[in-house]
């Protein structure tokens, strides 16, 4: 008998007489319920991202985003910048001066890069989390290998709860279009030596989110 | 692997109790995780409902495990994952070894996984000449030192900064340092090299989702992201009890698990991996293999009461809460699964022959049950296993010393004789009260040994029955 048949047989024998019942209640239990408005979601995202030690820069449009991006990169003294293949990343990095852009497929370049720039497909207000999907962008290593990750986020992509994010990455419930979905809350961290928190152990030491929110301008005094 | 001897629990525990460094570290770690957990739970008013839901989802998954596994296999296969099955540790290790052999002499990067530790995969691969590199910082430290994990969340908690500094100086040839940032940077540099050249990545999984054929991995460091993204081939070892029905169920466990483990609202990273790269424009492994591991789990499933231990999500909260674990740490249990849940899982997976001591390593105080995010009734399971040992239902009775058990049996028989008759009971309580007042309890042999370092609560001057009678006489 194959291992598969054997194990499934043992499981079936073990379950003889067991009645399978669906779990009562809702998966949304303990999900925050006060995040209906755009403003509430942005606000909660901002608070939770800060709690997770991520930085946030809010800009009103792409032109402003490009300007802030250039600042962030020069402050980090990043000369080699890994970029994902998203059109927005290409657009915003076009004006960067004195830097070398590294393609997301260039392993050696990625390992040497001082910053990585990617988009973010969704974000979660409940936890201050970024959600990166791979079906529309090569963002896996760009967001992981360099010590600084700059993430471009449209305010409309901020969802209320983790449940909303799970529904967004797999709308049909039959398999995500992305082979990898990465949820990111703050920089890479460890406390494995005497429980002392150190950031940047394997992944980025710093996470900066560039939030593009046109409503910022409307609300500006 | 010097510590994997559950049959030597007593000896191991005594050694741990004599290790001041270990005990200090344990106090710090379990105290910190416990406090952080308390704070994280306090801000969730619906915590109880959340636990109920998680318990129900796990119960549903386990009660239909065959269906869930077949569904997972079908969906995962459709995503391009090769699904394999392994009856036991040897079979699982052989499968991984075969994959490594096919790749020649690949650089192997491993991320922390209880399942791979359970089957002793590293030993197996090393015997075949492979050099798997652990990449979780704590796991890497103890791999360099040739030791085993002492805590599920902080595996190297028993090592001081100074010891880590000396270890790195010796093994990596770097200047000695006692700065945790410096040491962490050195680890990053060394392990980056392994990741850059790795051809085979080996991980576990926190959850397998039947509905989508995906696995979910939870971490803080980023080494799991690296191990699942960089190597050409990815192998995930997944216990068959890890499967949950639906993707939306994950939100329940994501709210529970980090809060229970470290007190974080969410860990830094979760990776939902549903298959190898989708095409030449995609990133990730070219080949992905999931090995579904039984290794005793189906036998636990067959036991109606022990079954609920398969719901464990490996958060470590019961370890931090356990007054026994807090004193002796993980090594004493002689198994990769320590603490209250370990004392149930290890006998469940291995049988009681060598593990008969473990169910007794508990004060049955119930702290573990109180913190368990999936509400496993650990004291009840420990009591049940104790009964198996005492009544000889389990093989390997002889592992427990016979004499104390005979005394224990006699003592309980005597107790039953006393307590089942009102006259005998009242009389014995009066005698015991007088004996305590006279200090006799400090002199009699079994009581004297027990009282070394412990104090009995004094009897009340008047018993409840006596007070009731008096009040009755006064007409109240």
Image: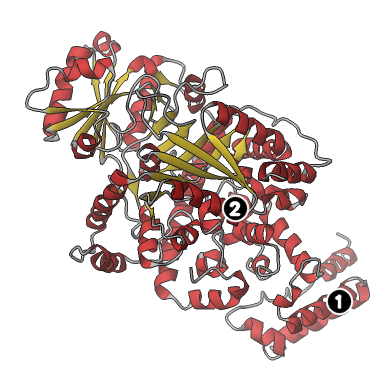
Mark 2 element type:
helix
Residue B15 x, y percent position in the rendering: 50, 77
Q: Residue at x 54, y 60 (%)?
A: B336
Quarter of the image with the C terminus of chain A in it: top left
Q: Quadrant of residue B133?
A: bottom left
Mark 1: give few (<14), some (14-19) or many (20+) Cα within 10 Å: few
- Horizontal side of residue A76 vs B276, given as left or right: left
Tell whether label 1 touches label 2 (CB within 8 Å).
no
Is residue A28 visible in the rendered image? The answer is no
Q: Residue at x 41, y 68 (%)?
A: B24
- Tag 1 subunit: B
Q: Report how far apart the C-alphas of labels 2 and 1 lie in the structure.
A: 47 Å
Mark 1 element type:
helix
Seen from the viewer's position, the closer of residues B95 and B441 is B95
Q: Residue at x 78, y 65 (%)?
A: B388
Extreme residue in the top direction: A218
- Tag 2 subunit: B
- B406 w.r.t. B247: above or below: below
Mark 2: give few (<14), some (14-19) or many (20+) Cα within 10 Å: some
- B192 w.r.t. B281: above or below: below
- B115 w.r.t. A206: above or below: below
Q: Which residue is mark 1?
A: B413
Q: Which residue is mark 2?
A: B91
- Horizontal side of residue A198 vs B272, given as left or right: left
């Amino acid at each position: 008998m194959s291992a598969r048949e054997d194990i499934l047989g043992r499981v079936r024998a073990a379950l003889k007489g067991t009645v399978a019942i669906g779990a009562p209640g809702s998966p949304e239990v303990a999900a925050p319920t006060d995040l209906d408005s755009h403003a509430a979601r942005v606000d909660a995202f901002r608070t939770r991202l800060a709690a997770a030690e991520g930085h946030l820069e809010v800009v009103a449009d792409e032109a402003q985003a490009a300007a802030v991006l250039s600042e962030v990169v020069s402050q980090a003294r990043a000369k080699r910048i890994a970029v994902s293949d998203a059109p927005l990343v290409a657009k915003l990095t076009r004006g960067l001066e004195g830097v070398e852009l590294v393609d997301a497929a260039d392993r050696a370049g990625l390992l040497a890069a001082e910053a990585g720039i990617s988009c973010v497909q969704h974000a979660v207000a409940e936890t201050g989390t970024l959600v990166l999907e791979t079906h529309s962008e090569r963002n896996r290593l760009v967001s992981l290998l360099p010590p600084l990750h700059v993430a471009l986020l449209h305010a409309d992509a901020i969802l209320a709860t983790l449940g909303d994010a799970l529904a967004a990455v797999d709308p049909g419930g039959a398999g995500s279009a992305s082979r990898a979905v990465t949820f990111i809350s703050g920089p890479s961290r460890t406390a494995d030596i005497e429980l002392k928190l150190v950031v940047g152990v394997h992944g980025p030491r710093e996470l900066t989110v560039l939030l593009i929110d046109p409503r910022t301008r409307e609300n500006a005094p | 692997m010097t510590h994997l001897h559950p049959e030597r629990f007593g000896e191991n525990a005594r050694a741990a109790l004599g290790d001041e460094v270990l005990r200090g570290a344990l106090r710090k770690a379990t105290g910190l995780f416990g406090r952080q957990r308390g704070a994280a739970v306090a801000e969730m008013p619906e915590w109880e409902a959340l636990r109920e839901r998680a318990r129900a989802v796990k119960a549903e998954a386990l009660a239909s495990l065959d269906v869930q596994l077949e569904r997972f296999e079908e969906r995962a296969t459709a995503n391009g994952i090769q699904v394999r099955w392994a009856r036991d540790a040897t079979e699982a290790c052989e499968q991984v070894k075969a994959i490594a052999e096919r790749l020649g002499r690949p650089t192997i990067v491993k991320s922390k996984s209880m399942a791979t530790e359970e089957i002793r995969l590293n030993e197996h691969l090393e015997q075949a000449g492979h050099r798997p590199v652990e990449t979780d910082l704590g796991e890497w430290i103890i791999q360099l030192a040739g030791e085993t994990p002492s805590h599920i969340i902080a595996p190297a908690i028993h090592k001081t900064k100074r010891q880590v500094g000396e270890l790195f100086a010796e093994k990596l040839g770097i200047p000695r340092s006692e700065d945790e940032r410096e040491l962490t940077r050195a680890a990053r540099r060394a392990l980056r090299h392994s990741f850059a050249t790795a051809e085979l990545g080996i991980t576990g999984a926190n959850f397998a989702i039947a509905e989508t054929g995906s696995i979910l991995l939870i971490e803080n460091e980023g080494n799991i992201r690296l191990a699942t993204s960089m190597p050409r081939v990815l192998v995930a070892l997944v216990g068959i009890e890890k499967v949950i029905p639906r993707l939306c169920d994950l939100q329940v466990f994501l709210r529970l698990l980090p809060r229970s483990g470290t007190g974080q609202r969410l860990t830094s990273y979760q990776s939902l991996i549903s298959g190898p790269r989708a095409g030449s424009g995609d990133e990730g492994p070219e080949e992905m293999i999931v090995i579904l591991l039984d290794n005793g789990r189906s036998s636990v499933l067959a036991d109606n009461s022990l079954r609920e231990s398969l719901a464990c999500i490996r958060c470590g909260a019961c370890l931090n809460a356990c007054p026994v674990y807090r004193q002796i740490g993980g090594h004493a249990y002689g198994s990769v699964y320590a603490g209250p849940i370990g004392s149930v899982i290890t006998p469940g997976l291995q049988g009681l022959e060598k593990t008969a001591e473990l169910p007794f390593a508990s004060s049955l105080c119930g702290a573990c049950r109180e913190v368990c995010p999936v509400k496993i009734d650990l004291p009840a399971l420990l009591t049940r296993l104790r009964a198996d040992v005492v009544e000889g239902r389990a093989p390997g009775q002889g592992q427990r010393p016979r004499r104390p058990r005979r005394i224990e049996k006699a003592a309980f028989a005597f107790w039953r004789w006393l307590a089942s008759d009102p006259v005998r009971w009242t009389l014995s309580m009066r005698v015991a009260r007088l004996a305590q007042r006279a200090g006799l309890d400090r002199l009699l042999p079994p009581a004297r040994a027990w009282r070394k370092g412990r104090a009995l609560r004094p009897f009340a001057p008047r018993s409840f029955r006596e007070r009731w009678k008096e009040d009755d006489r006064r007409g109240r």
